[in-house]
Image (cartoon, grey):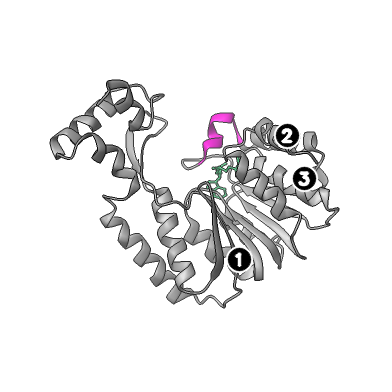
Amino acid sequence: MNQISLIEYCRAANGMLPDNVYEALFDAAMNLGNGAVLEIGTAHGAATTAIGLGLLEKSSNNHIFTVDIFGGRYSSRSAFGSPADNIKIVKSNLARAGIEKLVTVFAGSSFAFANSGGCPDSLSMLMLDADGRIDRDFFLFYELTKPGSLIVIDDADDCIFLSRNSSDEPYVDLKHRITHLLVDRFQGAGFISDLRMISNTLFCRSTGKALAREPFMDMVIEAYRELVFSAGGPGWNDLAIIAPRASQARKALDLYDSVSKKINPVRKIIRRLGL
Ligand SMILES: C[S@@+](CC[C@H](N)C(=O)[O-])C[C@H]1O[C@@H](n2cnc3c(N)ncnc32)[C@H](O)[C@@H]1O
């Protein structure tokens, strides 16, 4: 399998992750032990393709279960039509890469999949890249991992973004920050080890530690509690650079608000205005 065609397949599947993450997924898939692969957040199957091609390369018989809600408020897939339209796109992308037989696509939420009766009972790899509710998906599926199983969590850097929703309204995006705060606690509590960041994506190992609901939920609430103090950190550096004073930062936000949603993030405005 040459790396150029790997990336071409991922890009043809509207892949949203950087090339080096798809390459790392491919490499990781070549080295998995026994057990299924579970991916939450298929989108159009780019990461699924990288993992599937890695499995194919090693003639592994691990099966991939990939789950996506394909619609609703927190799904970028709504822009591509109905869930049925999206499933068609995913299936044709998997077929193009020749991995369709390795993959079961589940259309529905992670919660629905966990309760569907079709969930595998042992995972060699768990990949979480859905709507930012890492706590929900970690709680649902962590216990299916074994010590040493690979866990991949996207958007785990500690960044805060200024973004816009589909109605063009600006909002502060704390998805990466909450993921980072949760991952910190998962590590502190001994659920994960061997953490390695590739771009914004965390690759780590399950320790297989038993997870009890109540202390886990307390830990999660503490992580969300910390969001209250989110001002600061690398995400705000963009604003801090142009305006140490609050009034100028506010002006920058007003400017951000007044320009097209295509010009994002704020850094581009700053550069354009030479501030
Ligand atoms: C960032 S995309 C995944 C990108 C993909 N891994 C890739 O390589 O291109 C996130 C996906 O998660 C899906 N999603 C959002 N909430 C979900 C949920 N509760 N259960 C399952 N999938 C969900 C969305 O529909 C969207 O397609």
Q: What residue is shown with label 1?
A: 205
The answer to whether mark 2 and mark 1 are in CB contact below 8 A is: no
Q: Which mark is residue 4?
A: 2
How many residues crowd mark 1 within 10 Å: few (<14), some (14–19), many (20+)?
Answer: many
Q: Which part of the image, by quadrant, shows the C terminus? A: top left
Q: Earlier in the sequence, mark 2 or mark 3?
A: 2
Mark 2 and mark 3: span between their CA atoms?
13 Å
Q: Position of residue 143 (x, y in %)?
A: 61, 70
Mark 2 and mark 1: span between their CA atoms?
28 Å
Magenta part of the chain: 75-82
Q: What residue is shown with label 3?
A: 53
Q: Nearer the viewer, mark 2 or mark 1?
A: 2
191 above or below 259? below
Near-viewer residue (193 or 176):
193
Mark 1 and mark 3: span between their CA atoms?
21 Å
Q: Residue at x 69, y 36 (%)?
A: 7
Give the structural element (helix, strand or loop) at label 3: helix
**In the image, is 204 to the left or to the right of 240?**
right
